[in-house]
Amino acid sequence: MDIFSNHIFIFFASFALFYIYHCLGITLGYHRLLSHRSLVVPKWMEYFIVSGGYLAFEGSPIFWVSTHRLHHRFSDSKGDPHSPLDGLWHAFIAWMWNPKVIISLEESQKQAPDLYRDPIYRFLHCRHSIWDGYLCLLIGVLFRVALFLSCGIWILLGNLAATALAFCGPLLVNSISHLRQFGYETYPCGDNSRNVWFVAALSMGEGWHNNHHAFPQSARHGLKTTEFYFTWLTICLLEKLKIAHSIRLAKPDNKVNLKKDAEPAGKR
Ligand SMILES: [Zn+2]
Ligand SMILES: [Zn+2]
């Protein structure tokens, strides 16, 4: 019984730590730091945070950021890579292997010129070939083999459960948080983005998605006191530790971002 409860403890501790690592890798790394440049951290810290998203099978940062910037530009209209208007399953996950929007090399370079300037992100993107997905898969599997050999099965199982949950976060944001049947809209901004509490709870705050579409560059998504946001607390902690700076926030007099006003890709 003691051994069993010990294993359960190790599983949940591993799950909690890896969930924070992988989820923040997506919300703070891929989304806040790379896609919207909502804050600045030292390069070593940026790579560490982004590694959490990469090892959660999010694909190459250039792929993710190009797709996401296009999503903001064409949200819920022709050109949006993953809108529920093309079907809920498509918006959830099918857009990855059956895309309605093919992003060419030229488009990708236009959307993410800042990331193309970084040799590591360029390397992970494999010259815009399908190998970027296979490379991400391979490195993710090797990471888990190393984890199993060095730490054992219970830590690996905790990691796998955390990875699965973290992976679902952005999928739910792309689908549920763009369905008018769920949540609420605080800022009409010309698309179907919604604030959905249970998506926010699962994804460390990303579910306050209507706020995010209204103020895409803001590092903080939860704007009311009831809109809790773990990622924002992490950003506050990084700022207190003098690791994060130049944090961009929505101000009360900021104009709500409308789709047609979308900031040109890669421009700050
Ligand atoms: Zn969206
Ligand atoms: Zn965004």
Image: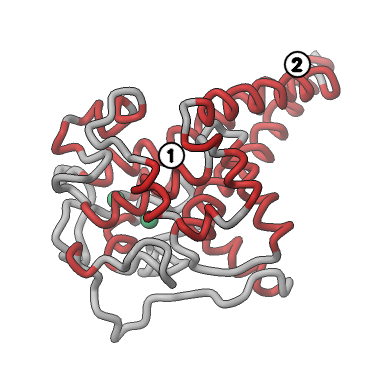
Image quadrant holding the N terminus, namely top right
Tell me if the residue at label 1 has its CB under 8 Å from ligand 2.
Answer: no
SS state under label 1:
helix
**Residue name at image x 26 percent, y 65 percent:** 262
The residue under label 1 is 169
Tell me if the residue at label 2 has its CB under 8 Å from ligand 2.
Answer: no
**Residue name at image x 49 percent, y 50 percent:** 204
Does any portion of residue 116 appear in the rendered image? Answer: yes
Report the Cα–Cα distance between label 2 and label 1: 25 Å
Location of residue 153 in the rendering, given as x and y in whole percent from the top left corner: 75, 16
Would you say the residues marked 2 and 1 are in contact, meaning their CB atoms lie under 8 Å apart?
no
The residue under label 2 is 153
Q: Which mark is residue 188?
A: none
Location of residue 228 in the rendering, given as x and y in whole percent from the top left corner: 44, 59
Q: Is residue 224 left or right of residue 128?
A: left
- Seen from the viewer's position, the closer of residues 77 and 187 is 77
Q: Earlier in the sequence, mark 2 or mark 1?
A: 2
Does 173 sit above or below residue 244?
Answer: above
Q: Residues within 10 Å of mark 2 (few under 14, many from 20)?
A: some
- Three-letter amino acid code at disc 1? Gly
**Residue name at image x 44 percent, y 72 percent:** 268
